[in-house]
């Protein structure tokens, strides 16, 4: 796994990213991998790509996209005006799971947050993703808060 390289996602990467988002029990119910991709994906990509506080990343090995995640840098007044890093939409391609790619992705993302001056990194995870919870625990994340969502 030493050949993993991280870079900012490009519009041409969207089909691979959406395919990874759809490749699990929860994602297959909410994503649409049909081509051409739904316009919402393109609009979201443009919004993310144009926002300096957003970083949609892909992990590549050679020409293959093997992982993705989104970093959001959140300015806030709490903690004396501290900047936080939020990690979302983490996925590893099925062909590369259980090979250390996820750990490399998190190490990279945490380093990016440090470089931006974040004082903490946070994430949310679906309560049914028990394997992910164990993975986050191993990385040193603590389940310190309870999250709520309101569907609109």
Image (cartoon, rainbow, N blue to C red):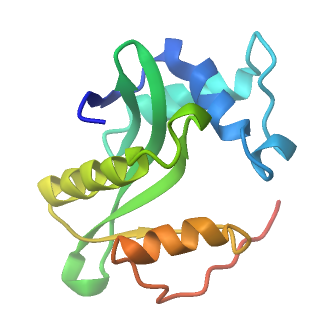
Image coordinates for residue 81, horizontal then vertical, percent: 22, 77
Given residues 49 and 105, the one toward you in this image is: 105
Given residues 101 and 41, the one toward you in this image is: 101
The number of callouts visible is: 0
Looking at the image, residue 104 sits to the left or right of residue 22; the answer is left
The image quarter containing residue 39 is top right
Looking at the image, residue 51 sits to the left or right of residue 126; the answer is left
Q: Is residue 112 above or below residue 76?
A: above
Looking at the image, residue 112 sits to the left or right of residue 104; the answer is left
Q: Quadrant of the C terminus?
A: bottom right
Looking at the image, residue 151 sits to the left or right of residue 93; the answer is right
Given residues 107 and 151, the one toward you in this image is: 107
Q: Is residue 78 above or below residue 115?
A: below
The image quarter containing residue 52 is top left
Residue shown at 73% from the left, 37% from the top: 22
Residue shown at 43% from the left, 45% from the top: 99
Image coordinates for residue 10, horizontal then vertical, percent: 43, 18
Image coordinates for residue 75, horizontal then vertical, percent: 31, 65
Residue shown at 26% from the left, 27% from the top: 3
Q: Quadrant of the N terminus?
A: top left
Given residues 97 and 65, the one toward you in this image is: 97
């Amino acid at each position: 796994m030493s050949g993993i390289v991280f870079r900012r996602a490009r519009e041409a990467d969207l089909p691979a990213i959406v395919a990874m988002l759809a490749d699990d029990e929860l994602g297959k119910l909410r994503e649409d991998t049909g081509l051409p991709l739904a316009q919402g994906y393109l609009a979201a990509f443009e919004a993310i790509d144009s926002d300096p506080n957003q970083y949609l990343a892909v992990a590549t090995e050679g020409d293959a996209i093997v992982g993705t995640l989104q970093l959001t840098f959140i300015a806030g007044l709490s903690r004396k005006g501290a900047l936080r890093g939020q990690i979302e939409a983490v996925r590893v391609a099925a062909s590369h799971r259980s090979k250390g790619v996820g750990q490399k992705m998190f190490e990279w993302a945490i380093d990016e947050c440090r470089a931006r001056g974040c004082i903490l990194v946070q994430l949310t995870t679906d309560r049914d993703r028990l394997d992910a919870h164990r993975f986050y625990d191993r990385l040193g994340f603590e389940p310190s808060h309870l999250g709520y969502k309101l569907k609109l």
